[in-house]
Amino acid sequence: MIDVKGLKKQFDDHMVLDGIDLSVEKGDVICIVGPSGCGKSTFLRCLTHLEEPTGGEIYLDGELITDRQIDDIRARMGMVFQHFNLFPNMTVRKNITLAPVQRKMMTQKEADAEAERLLERIGLLEKADVYPAMLSGGQKQRIAIVRALAMKPDVLLFDEPTSALDPEMVGEVLQLMQDLAREGMTMVVVTHEMGFAREVANRVIFIDEGIIKEDEPPEEFFAHPKNQRLQDFLSKVL
Amino acid sequence: MSVSEKFYQAFLYNDRWLQYLRGVGTTLLVTVIALAIGIVIGTVVALIRTAHDQQKGQRHPLLSAVNVILQIYVTVIRGTPMMVQLLIMAMVIFASSRNFTLVGALTLGINSGAYVAEIVRGGLMAVDSGQMEAGRSLGLNYITTMRFVIIPQAIKAVLPALGNEFIILLKDTSLITFIGGKELLYAAQGIMNRTYEAMFPLLIVAGMYLILVMIFTWLLGKFERKLRQSDRR
Ligand SMILES: Nc1ncnc2c1ncn2[C@@H]1O[C@H](COP(=O)(O)OP(=O)(O)O)[C@@H](O)[C@H]1O
Ligand SMILES: [Mg+2]
């Protein structure tokens, strides 16, 4: 579904990604782990050209991603941010329906129905007409996920979706992500939640020094890490 | 002449107070026209300059050219005295026009546009960059994201500064008297020319400006408190 070939990203003279190769298959749940500053966010952001890659190619269903059709590509690749980035100037309903309506995927009426269906699913239907400022962090992030889902994306990208949350709210967000994974949603998740990676992912990836140092199923990844730096990393976080 | 007689001459004789009031009316009208022009120019300039600054990768040549022109506009307007700008407009560019008040309002508006542009640009840049990224990540294009997400948030942030700009303009309208614009100070000058007495006409005009500024400062303060309340929601 997504094919990344030799992806490079350089900030000034700082080479953050130095040739990443990765194939994401339909239904994959891939967790990306690594020390802070190793380029996990940069990698996700390059996938949808939020950062302009310095080199390499990215394909979505065989189609080379370029700046020219980037809006159409982004409509098919949902992004969930660490800080939610809900639009504070609109209600929850409008947050969810804005993109499907503006992109002419749905009428406002259809989008409203879809928004209500999705809110019902996460138990937040009664919040449809409130503003984001009224919500808890966990509620905000679940609505941000639902906002991405309303676009019916082929794949969802998560950048540390629980890192900005109070501990008691982490569970509800991880639960929703786990449910989505069970339903077959393709997901690429940057996370420090090793429990989630172990339970939900079918592949776990370790990025270090700008390249993928390990790419294994979670059992192997956690039980028998081959890379020395991964062993050090795991001994610190587990 | 006694003091009370001077005041009578300056304010009451021949219903002269009406001339001041008409001056207040013109002053407010010129201020509103100038601010309207300033907001239109300033917003357009700010949007173009922001779009220019935010583009990634290869730069659009037309956008770069327009950006340079706008930068020159802002620099020239902010770098030269308003009085000089007024004289150039009245005596060079619109030398044949007799409608000095309108030329004055237009000049004030063009001048204000440069300041409003910086205010609006600041407001646009103050919106968290995550908002643009979230909009673009949903597949919305730049203009749609600006329209529905960034600009509404920026408006709220710049309203107090625009209120301030209104008050600055209100005082600056007095300058158009020197090109023959018929606003409040002009009324005082007309009366001074007839009575040969400067004190009361000038004091009255100063008092009127002060009252106007105080009223609008008070309204602005009320408005800002309301804005902040709606932030907490
Ligand atoms: N816009 C940028 N400009 C310059 N350097 C950046 C920028 N974004 C990220 N970096 C640098 O790239 C490296 C990787 O950052 P990031 O992808 O955010 O790491 P991670 O998400 O793994 O913590 C860091 O050293 C960071 O300082
Ligand atoms: Mg990061």
Image (tube, grey):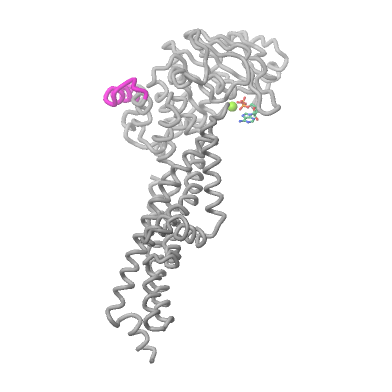
Report the front residue among B207 and A61.
B207
Decide: is B1 above or below B178.
Answer: below
Quarter of the render that holds ligand 1: top right
User: Is residue A227 toward the left or the right of residue B138 in the image?
Assistant: right
Residue at (44%, 44%) from the top-left corner? Answer: B43
**Magenta stretch: residue B71 in it?**
no
Direction front: furthest residue: B96
Residue B68 x, y percent position in the rendering:
55, 40
Residue bounds of the magenta highlight: A103-120
Q: Position of residue B196 (x, y in %)?
A: 41, 83
Q: Is residue B33 above or below residue A22?
A: below
Q: Is A112 one of the magenta-colored residues?
A: yes
Looking at the rendered image, the quarter that the C terminus of chain A falls into is: top right
Task: Name the side, left or right, on which B81 lies relative to A95.
Answer: right
Q: Is residue A120 above or below residue B170?
A: above
Near-viewer residue (B22 or B84): B84
The majority secondary structure of the magenta stretch comes to helix
Residue A208 visible in the shown view: yes
Tell me where residue A203 sits by quadrant: top right
Q: Which image quarter: residue A217?
A: top right
- Out of B213 and A159, give the one closest to the viewer: B213
Please provide percent x and percent y for residue B124. Answer: 48, 41
Q: Residue at x 31, y 24 (%)?
A: A111
* Image spot of residue B95 (x, y percent): 43, 59
Residue at 32% over, 34% down:
A129
